[in-house]
Image (spheres, grey):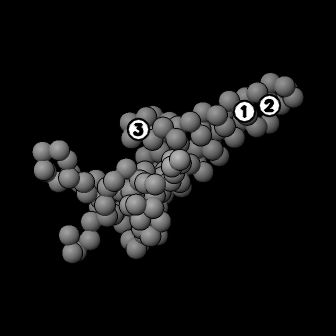
Amino acid sequence: MLQKNWNWKWRDNKVENQTSSTVPKGEKETFYKINNQGQTVECRVKNGFSWTVFLWGMFALIIRRQWRGLLFILVTLLTLAIIESIFNLRSIIWAPMMINLYYAFRANEDLRQGLLASGWKVKTSEN
């Protein structure tokens, strides 16, 4: 009996070979995808720190539809709230800001990986 391999998309699209970006920090990398009508759709993703996520937090993740990042932030905030209520701590008020800062560094890389995993390709000078 043939077993389903859940990582098929990563191997077939050779995403593991495209994970390291050749674009310098702060520069934008363009991804493209051909839609059902045969038109090319482009998406530009900045490499490095995400000021949008830093300033707007979870709202930026909702607009970008980055559900995994939103789930990460919500679960972490909920966990910290539970820990704070159990131990009656008031000293971890800075934790949500630190979580937001951490994810601001990760958001663009997660967006980039999500695009590659869903079939988008990196636009190079050849294509």
Q: Which residue is mark 1?
A: 79
Residue 38, percent from left and from top: 13, 50
Q: Quadrant of residue 46?
A: bottom left
Q: Residue at image x 33%, y 53%?
A: 119
Mark 3, other Cα within 10 Å: few <14 / some 14–19 / many ≥20: few
Is 80 placed left or right of 118 in the picture? right
Q: Which residue is mark 3?
A: 65
Mark 1, other Cα within 10 Å: few <14 / some 14–19 / many ≥20: few
Kindly state the secondary structure of the residue where label 3 is placed.
loop
User: How far separated are the C-alphas under marks 1 and 2?
Assistant: 6 Å
Q: Residue at image x 53%, y 47%?
A: 1
Q: Residue at image x 80%, y 36%?
A: 91
Is 99 placed left or right of 63 in the picture? right
Kindly state the secondary structure of the residue where label 1 is placed.
helix
Q: Please, is residue 87 above or below residue 53 in the view?
A: above
Q: Residue at image x 59%, y 40%?
A: 72
Residue 120, percent from left and from top: 32, 55
Between residue 60 and residue 90, name the one nearer to us.
Answer: 60
Number of callouts: 3
| Cβ atoms under marks 1 and 3 closer than 8 Å | no
Q: Quadrant of the C terminus?
A: bottom left
- Say whether residue 46 is visible: no
Q: Please, is residue 41 above or below residue 91 in the view?
A: below
Look at label 2 and name its amino acid.
Ile
Mark 2, other Cα within 10 Å: few <14 / some 14–19 / many ≥20: few
Task: Name which of mark 2 and mark 3 comes first in the sequence.
Answer: 3
Q: Which residue is mark 2?
A: 83
Is 42 placed left or right of 75 in the picture? left
